[in-house]
Image (tube, grey):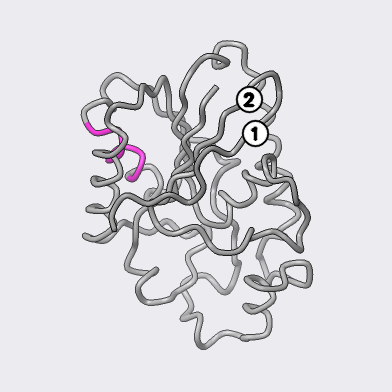
Amino acid sequence: MILYIVRHGQTKWNVQKRLQGASDTDLNENGIALAKVTGEALKEVPFSCCFTSPLKRARDTAELVLGERKKSVPVYPDDRIREISFGVWEGQDSTLLPQKMLDNFFHHPEKYQPPQGGEELSHILERTRDFWQDITSREELQDKTVLIASHGCCIRALLHNVYEEAGLENYWHGTVPPNCCVNVVEVRDGKAVLLEEDKIYYE
């Protein structure tokens, strides 16, 4: 099984530095362009199916990456790969929020405490692990190539099933995944190997 895990394209909120989380925002013009470029780069990849976050920016990215293939490649929304929720912080200008907690989220995740209504990092790790174990154990997918469209925080959680150094301290594995980056993972006999990390096709 080969998994192509793609982060959604850029949105207006990305540019404005507003926290998106589980809010359902749209791709901006640049985000659409980035997804199309990524799709062109992956046009020869024989995707059998696609799993996507139900949020529109991820679903639209998946469809743009698939291009004409979206007519023949089934796309399955899955809530387990929805982005983390920031609760009452969602939609807020991140420069006006408590900087210590945001710094913890990005640089000291083991100390992060979500705002009211927000989601714990341990919970997104749990639900993405459930998704990972489900997908990678499906007999019908063992010899297939699968597209997964999701979000920055969620993708890092997914890849904790691959990284040798896991745990909250190493949550981000160095950085937040860029928009439309691609992580490629091969899964054979239950063992996962990272073939490409945060690869982008638009620079």
Tell me the element at label 1: helix
Left/right placement of residue 32 relative to residue 197 reads: left
Q: Please name the residue shown 49% across and 18% down the image.
A: 144
Please determine whether, in this image, residue 28 is positioned above or below residue 72: below
The magenta stretch is 61-67
Q: Is residue 65 magenta?
A: yes
> Can you tell which quarter of the image residue 11 is in?
bottom left
Residue 136's disc is 2
Residue 132's disc is 1
Please determine whether, in this image, residue 100 is positioned above or below residue 141: below
> Residue 32 location, x and y as percent?
25, 52
How packed mark 2 is, by other alpha carbons closer than 10 Å (few <14, some 14-19, many 20 or more), is many
Q: Is residue 89 magenta?
A: no
- Foreground residue, 105 or 12? 105
Q: Are marks 1 and 2 in contact (CB under 8 Å)?
A: yes
Tell me the element at label 2: helix
Q: Please name the residue shown 62% across and 71% down the image.
A: 106
Please determine whether, in this image, residue 176 is positioned above or below residue 191: below
